[in-house]
Image: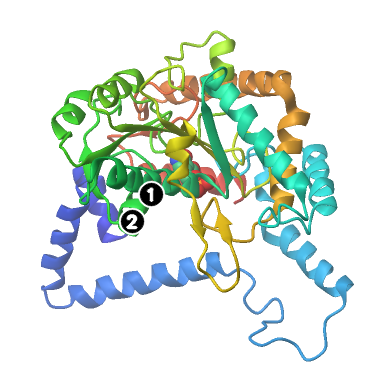
Amino acid sequence: MSWKDSIIRQFGKLNPKFLASIEKGMKAIPGVSQKIDAEYAEVMVELENSAKPYKNKFTRFTEIPQTGRSHAEILLEMESMRALEESHWKDGFVSGAVYHGDQKHIDFLNQVYAINSQSNPLHADVWPSATKFEAEIVAMTADMLGGAGQDVCGTVTSGGTESIMLAMKTYRDWAREKKGITRPEMIVPITAHAAFDKASQYFNIKTIHIPVDENFRADVEAARKAVTPNTIVIVGSAPSFPHGAIDPISELAELALQNNIGFHVDACLGGFVLPWAEKLGYPVTPFDFRLPGVTSMSADTHKYGYAAKGTSVVLYRGNELRHFQYYTTTEWPGGLYFSPTFAGSRPGALSAACWAAMTSVGAQGYLSATKKILETAEFIKKGIREIPELHVLGDPLFVVAFASESINVYKVLDYMSHKSGV
Ligand SMILES: Cc1ncc(COP(=O)(O)O)c(C=O)c1O
């Protein structure tokens, strides 16, 4: 057992800053520093081995080979990697990495990818199908998220992080032009995804963190107090990644509306579950464009939209707001250049596969998948509640987090991974 484990076992979970200060103090004791360093070295070797399982098993390329390798050799090597290390998720023990494991669905998406593998939405004149697919992905997602009959528009992005970062950059530029805000601030619950912090660092937007309540939902009063003349946007999650909690979206949306600031709902995880859960009769409070204060949303097609990895949708209330996301230059010697997202060239095949996933799964498919997810989540929550040492955090719908006051929960993780053979 490491020194940190034994402290956690005796005193329960400690504040990481406090743990760091204990570490500093302990390191000052003669002999202890070497022991801690040796422990770190051991952990690093373990990490290195698990992150690089192919070391010494396959040829390592550090320069382009003189003669190209045969396709058969390359394919065989990739198949062996898959067989050796990368098929564990198929046993059903991986959480949150693969969202649709059905082989027929995967084969279908691969076929779609193959047909469109050269497509690049940057060259809309060469691949007009990419424009059609993306426009329809956005339209279908907007319709699903309460945008029907409203002026909701958006773009396809490469994933949740890009959707979130684009939205934050959009608010920054909108607030600069419309309100003259040059020192922008965003109000973000501490449980919101790290992508918001990334946006804050990339785009120089100050993050004002607000706490969450005992059920891990954003504290609306704290948000109210945090609003200043520099606030450009408030953020809410539906649900959040750490605890699966849905923030009080309608209250936060109302607050934003009253103050004429943006309100972004991060529905990267829930965007393709909550609308169907609501239809199935689960208690889902309003979280989308049906609330007038919601001005943007992120929803990940590559999660519960069942598309291949590499797509998400960012939606805005109104073209005017979306306009601030775009990049255009007319001055470049290379010609007129326009791109709606961060990338220039993009994989049109992924948009085609996303469109194919959405139109092949269909509303009935999403409904029945959501039913199974919610029933499984109930089963998991019930199972956890039956174990006296564990408790479910908050009151989650389908993303379930649990903790323990009496045992080291990381050991539970270790044990479960070991049990599954991962
Ligand atoms: C709530 C939430 N927002 C954003 C993201 C970021 O998504 P991505 O990993 O696709 O960038 C995630 C990822 O799990 C998420 O759960």
Quadrant of image for the N terminus:
bottom left
Image coordinates of residue 418 in percent, x first then y, are: 55, 49
Dot 1 or dot 2, earlier in sequence: 1
Q: Residue at x 49, y 44 (%)?
A: 163
Asked if the residue at tag 2 contacts the one at tag 1, i.e. Cβ–Cβ closer than 8 Å, the answer is: yes
Kindly give the residue lying farthest to the bottom in the view shown.
Answer: 66
Indicate the secondary structure of the residue bearing disc 2: helix
The answer to whether 72 is drawn above or below residue 112 in the figure is: below
Indicate the secondary structure of the residue bearing disc 1: helix
Q: Nearer the viewer, residue 232 or 176?
A: 176
Q: Nearer the viewer, residue 380 or 415?
A: 380
Any part of residue 267 in sight:
no
Query: As drawn, is 13 to the left or to the right of 67?
Result: left
Q: Nearer the viewer, residue 422 or 142?
A: 142
Query: As drawn, is 294 to the left or to the right of 145?
Result: left
- Amino acid type of the residue that numbered disc 2 sits on in the rendered structure: Phe
Kindly give the residue lying farthest to the top in the view shown.
Answer: 281
Q: Nearer the viewer, residue 316 or 88?
A: 316
User: Residue 304 lies in what quarter of the image?
Assistant: top right
Residue denoted by label 1:
169
The answer to whether 417 is drawn above or below residue 62 in the figure is: above
- Amino acid type of the residue that numbered disc 1 sits on in the rendered structure: Lys
Residue denoted by label 2:
203
Label of residue 141 in the image:
none
Is ligand 1 less than 8 Å from the beta carbon at label 1? Answer: no
User: Residue 396 lies in what quarter of the image?
Assistant: top left
The answer to whether 86 is drawn above or below residue 54 in the figure is: above
Image coordinates of residue 353 in percent, x first then y, are: 74, 43
Image coordinates of residue 225 in percent, x first then y, are: 13, 30
Image coordinates of residue 361 in percent, x first then y, are: 74, 28
Between the residue at mark 1 and the residue at mark 2, the CA separation in whole angstroms equals: 7 Å
Circle 1 residues within 10 Å: few <14, some 14–19, many ≥20: many
